[in-house]
Image (spheres, helix red, strand yellow):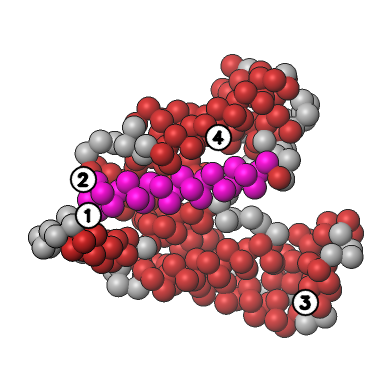
Amino acid sequence: MAKTLTNIVFYSPWERRRIARIVFLLIGLSLIWSFFSDTLLHQLQRPVIKFPDVDLTYWGMHWLGIPEFLTGNFFVALFFDLALFAACCLSFWAPEKRLYIWSFIVLYFFYFITFNTFGAHHTNHKIGFLLIALPFTVTDYKSFNYLWQGLRYFFLFALADAFLWKFFRLAWLHTDQGLMIMKKNAAAVLYFESDSWLAGLYHWLLQHPGLVNAGYIAGIIMEAAFIIGFFTRKYDQYLFVLSVLLTLGFWLIADAYFFQFMVLTLTLINFHKLYEPRRFASNLKKGDMTPV
């Protein structure tokens, strides 16, 4: 049964298993999306440009030659992608098996580094799937709950820090900041996909700059609201809604796909409230009147 300690909901092993299945279902859907986006390793076609930048992790991976090995041969890359899908499916099927979880984390880490380094840009959105899998690597359900709550605070920090970054750099004083961000990031869509519905939407927004700039300021205010989460969990359901709106805003104005990072919004959901009625109904069918 879930317990509450200092306003922290402690999920039971039964609930943990179902949360894990939601997590790995979303990860699996993301991998399918990567396949149709031609961004799995076997679809990179032996890339030669790399961007390790000044990150010691990336330097170490390239010093070991792991990204080059994984992408240098089509069949090696294909086997890796199949293994990644298999690890995700096994983690969904048996989330209590730590071997499956760790296998997925290691494989996804290699995929994360390789995708970023040959994409010639350090993207941050995929890190969400790496982090959200970590709580399921422990056997003790209390340790799982502490790690899960730790991810909640990390997510709150990420969005609150985004607000502080804009606030102290005085970006909010630039009246056309939102419009300039959209112009920079929508240029490729307007040029290469000029007949698409998205390009049409951008054309309309460019004719109404006040809406774009107002949306940018609204986004800053929404990011600031996540500071509240450090002091109370009472408004987590509203913060969840704001996180969804922010994700759509990042995509529309900045052409940034933070959908995968926003998987961490699951830490804002009180799954105990969702699962408790189902468990009670299940027990009633079995003739068990013991409260859950």
**Which of the two marks, 3 or 2, is nearer to us in this view?**
2
- Magenta span dominant secondary structure: helix
Q: Earlier in the sequence, mark 2 or mark 1?
A: 1
**Which of the two marks, 4 or 3, is nearer to us in this view?**
4
What is the C-alpha distance between the residues marked 2 and 4? 29 Å
Marks 2 & 1, CB-CB < 8 Å contact: yes
Percent across and percent down for residue 43 are: 74, 33
Q: Earlier in the sequence, mark 4 or mark 3?
A: 4
**Which of the two marks, 4 or 1, is nearer to us in this view?**
4
Q: Mark 3 sits on what residue?
A: 205
- The amino acid type, in three-letter code, at marker 1 is Phe
Q: Nearest the camera: 182 or 198?
A: 198
Percent across and percent down for residue 211 are: 70, 81
Q: Which mark is residue 95?
A: none
Helix or strand or loop: what does disc 3 sit on?
helix
Q: Mark 1 sits on what residue?
A: 10
- The amino acid type, in three-letter code, at marker 3 is Leu
Range shown magenta: 8-35
User: Is residue 215 rendered to the left or right of residue 203?
Assistant: left
Helix or strand or loop: what does disc 1 sit on?
strand
Q: Earlier in the sequence, mark 3 or mark 1?
A: 1
Q: Earlier in the sequence, mark 4 or mark 1?
A: 1
